[in-house]
Amino acid sequence: MPQRRGREAYRVFVSYSHKDRWIAKQCVRLIEEVGKGRIRAFLDERDIEVGQHIAEEVLDAIRRCDEFVVLLSPNSKDRPWVTFEMGAARSRKKPVMAILHNLSPPDMPEMIYPYKAVDLNDFEAQYLEQLWKRLETR
């Protein structure tokens, strides 16, 4: 696991619908690239092994994350798992970053509507730049 001068890597949990798996993988790749070894993103299909309890692993990853990213799309906005993960992040007072794909802010789930969102087309220019700034001030 990447380390930063004896500190644990900055952890980003990524929530998404499996119908948006390719996009989520690209987001994770970019998140980890911008971190240059100092950021570790959680992606369930990569980080949960066969035989592990899915809900326990997800809750543990959310508990340990520094921020929570949710890829909101027509595929994910009403998915029970995505809603479960958003609720777990909110209850743990994790910073929530909503990335919108083919969705506008009024279509966001009510529990996440108060959070400023970024369109997927602006992911690099807005989210990744801000992530880098958060990492630098850490």
Image (spheres, rainbow, N blue to C red):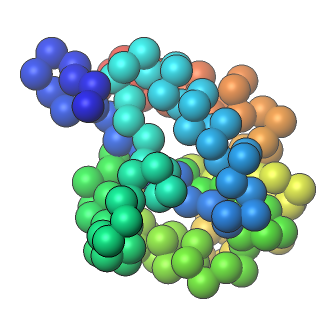
Q: Which residue, as the protein is rendered here, is positioned at the far front? A: 50
- The percent coordinates of residue 125 (x first, y second) are 71, 24
Q: In the picture provided, is 12 more to the left or to the right than 63?
A: right
Residue in the picture at 56% in, 38% down: 28
- When asked about the image quadrant of residue 11, the answer is top left
Does residue 72 lie above or below 76 as drawn? above
Looking at the image, can residue 99 be seen?
no
Residue in the picture at 63% in, 61% down: 16
Q: In the picture provided, is 102 more to the left or to the right than 128?
A: right
Q: Which residue, as the protein is rendered here, is positioned at the far left? A: 6
Between residues 117 and 79, which one lies in front from this camera angle? 79
- When asked about the image quadrant of residue 121, the answer is top right
- The percent coordinates of residue 48 (x first, y second) are 38, 59
Quadrant housing the N terminus: top left
Quadrant housing the C terminus: top left
Does residue 81 lie above or below 28 as drawn? below
- The percent coordinates of residue 73 (x first, y second) are 79, 62
Residue in the picture at 67% in, 64% down: 18
Q: In the picture provided, is 105 more to the left or to the right than 94?
A: right
Q: Which residue, as the protein is rendered here, is positioned at the far bottom? A: 80
Does residue 133 lie above or below 117 as drawn? above
- The percent coordinates of residue 108 (x first, y second) are 75, 69
Residue in the picture at 26% in, 54% down: 64
Between residues 16 and 67, which one lies in front from this camera angle? 16
How many numbered circles does the render carry? Answer: 0
Looking at the image, can residue 42 be seen?
yes
